[in-house]
Image (cartoon, rainbow, N blue to C red):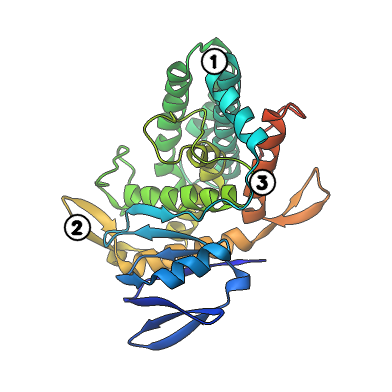
Amino acid sequence: MKKTLYIFTSGELKRKDNSLYFESEAGRKYIPVEDTNDIYIFGEVDVTKRFLEFAAAKEICIHYFNHYGYYTGTFYPREHYNAGHVILKQAEHYIDKEKRLELARIFIAGSIAQMRQVLKYYQTRAKNGKEEITALIEKFKERTSELSEGHTVEELMAVEGHAREDYYKMFDYIINDPDFRFEKRSKRPPLNRLNAMISFGNSLCYTMVLSEIYKTYLDPRIGYLHATNFRRFSLNLDVAEIFKPIMVDRLIFMLINKKMIGKKDFDKQMNGILLTESGRKKFVAELDKRMQTTVNHRHLGKSVSYRRLIRLELYKIQKHILGEKTYEPYRSMW
């Protein structure tokens, strides 16, 4: 399995012959290019043109985050898996209102189903709010049926927004730490510790999906739930809706409830609260472990990693737009 490289320190990424390495005050660290899926840069890192050329040849995406942990952009190499027919079909499903609405409904239904599954997991584990969590699990059945009544993407997103708002209200029952209260969703900047973790985790999820799209024939610029017009990438945002609840939210619950992250891992910055470098390192380390964890895939009849699940999801979307099989989003069973 290819791995992800995370860089937090300052230095320079270089190429020497047929190898890549990272040079910093600590010395030179070689990068096993054949085993590297993508690179995440959080530190002040200079990159040479020769490095980027070789990284592109080895199909390595490079994701950049600024000093505060905000995602700033991606070096997305020239596609190696071009397929004009697939891109035309992708565009067709975006331009055709009904086809786009169908995919948008599927993404939202999948997202709500995953949120419902997370709530079911914590239904008996939560110390408080069991009745509230149970009630919302039942309510989410109604939310899914509401999707058939939506006639625009905006109406569908409103259904998803209300569902997610209700879902976030359950976080205070699932988390057993008064230092991490949800209060309300806040982003740029996050106004409390829990929101800081959600924003950081979601950004990582978006970029992981983007890296996996690169390994397929799909074009990341053509999404269906999130508008394509004014975004560099949008398909990754659509697909991430399926995975954020099980990959990000459940990781956050574990980190807090097991005391793996605490108040000391946050700083007040830019009128908000953000993870410190040590906090981001802890988060990334545990997320990386989670992405390598394998789960039983009921349709394949074998175990696959969470990272592989994303790629399999993209293959299903590709089959949908090619008219081979209607897309059914992945649903966690635990």
Task: Compare residues 35 and 69 and report the one nearer the observer.
Answer: 35
In the displayed structure, does residue 215 sit left or right of residue 229?
Answer: right
- Residue 114 in percent (x, y) is at 58, 37
Q: Specify whether 189 is left or right of 196.
A: left
Q: Nearer the viewer, mark 2 or mark 1?
A: 1
Q: Quadrant of the N terminus?
A: bottom right
- Asked whether the viewer can see residue 199, the reply is yes
Q: CA distance from mark 3 to mark 2?
A: 36 Å
Query: Which amino acid lies under the numbered mark 2 shown in the image of this protein?
Result: Lys
Instruction: Give the percent coordinates (x, y) of residue 271.
Output: 16, 50
Q: Amino acid at mark 1?
A: Lys
271 or 83, nearer to the observer: 83
Label 1 SS: helix
Q: What's the distance in space between the residues labelled 2 and 1, CA to CA?
A: 44 Å
Tag 2–tag 1 contact (CB < 8 Å): no
- Between the C-alphas of marks 1 and 3, the distance is 35 Å
Residue named by callout 3: 334
Q: Earlier in the sequence, mark 3 or mark 2?
A: 2
Lower position in the chain sequence, tag 1 or tag 3: 1
Q: Quadrant of residue 113?
A: top right
CB contact under 8 Å: marks 3 and 2: no
Mark number, residue 224: none
Residue 333 lies, in percent from the top left, at 69, 43
Q: Residue furthest left?
A: 271
Name the residue carrying label 1.
97
> Which residue is pictured at 72% across the width and 34% down the height?
319
The answer to whether any part of residue 327 appears in the image is: no
Which of the two labelled residues, at mark 2 and mark 1, occupies the earlier sequence position? Answer: 1
Circle 2 residue? 268
Numbered disc 2: secondary structure: strand
Going by the numbered disc 3, the residue's amino acid type is Trp
